[in-house]
Amino acid sequence: MNRIYSHLDEINIIGKLADLKDSHYNQSLVLSSLIQVLIEKGVITAQDLQLKSKELDAALTPNPNRTGAHPIS
C-alpha cells in the first residue's frame, strides 16, 4: 500500500511541475509582449530596460561588503 501511495505522489509531483512550466511560459510570454509594446510605443527604450535590469540586479545581489543593510535601501 505504501508503495502505491509513493507512485501516486510521484505522478502528482510530475503533474505539478508540468503546470508550473506552463505557468512560467505564460508569464514569460506576457512579460515579453508587454516589454515589446512599451518599446514600440516609445514609452521605454531597450537601453532603459537594460540599465534598469542591471540596477535591480546589483541592488538585489548580496554584497559581502554591506553589513546588514537591506539590498534596496
Image: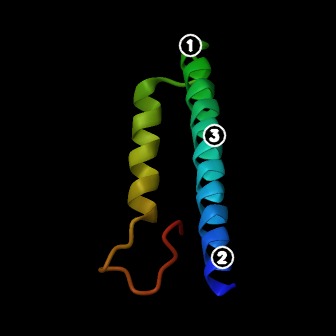
Q: Would you say 49 lies left or right of 25 here?
A: left
Q: Earlier in the sequence, mark 1 or mark 2?
A: 2
Secondary element under disc 2, as helix, strand or loop, is helix
Residue placed furthest toward the front: 1
Q: Quadrant of the C terminus?
A: bottom right
Image-quadrant location for residue 6: bottom right
Image-quadrant location for residue 24: top right
Secondary element under disc 3, as helix, strand or loop, is helix
Which x, y percent locates residue 27? 63, 40
Which label sits in the foreground, 1 or 3? Answer: 3
Disc 2/disc 3 C-alpha distance (Å): 35 Å
Question: Label 2 sits on what residue type?
Answer: Ile
In the depicted structure, whether residue 5 falls above or below residue 45: below
Q: Would you say 3 lies left or right of 60 here?
A: right
Which x, y percent locates residue 8? 67, 69
User: Mark 2 = which residue?
Assistant: 4
Disc 1/disc 2 C-alpha distance (Å): 54 Å
In the depicted structure, whether residue 8 falls above or below residue 30: below
Q: Earlier in the sequence, mark 2 or mark 3?
A: 2
Residue placed furthest toward the left: 65
Which label sits in the foreground, 2 or 3? Answer: 2
Question: Label 1 sits on what residue type?
Answer: Glu
Which x, y percent locates residue 45? 48, 23
Which residue corresponds to the image point at 40% horizontal and 28% vertical from the top-left?
Answer: 47
Secondary element under disc 1, as helix, strand or loop, is helix
Question: Label 3 sits on what residue type?
Answer: Gln
Question: In the image, which disc is placed on residue 27?
Answer: 3
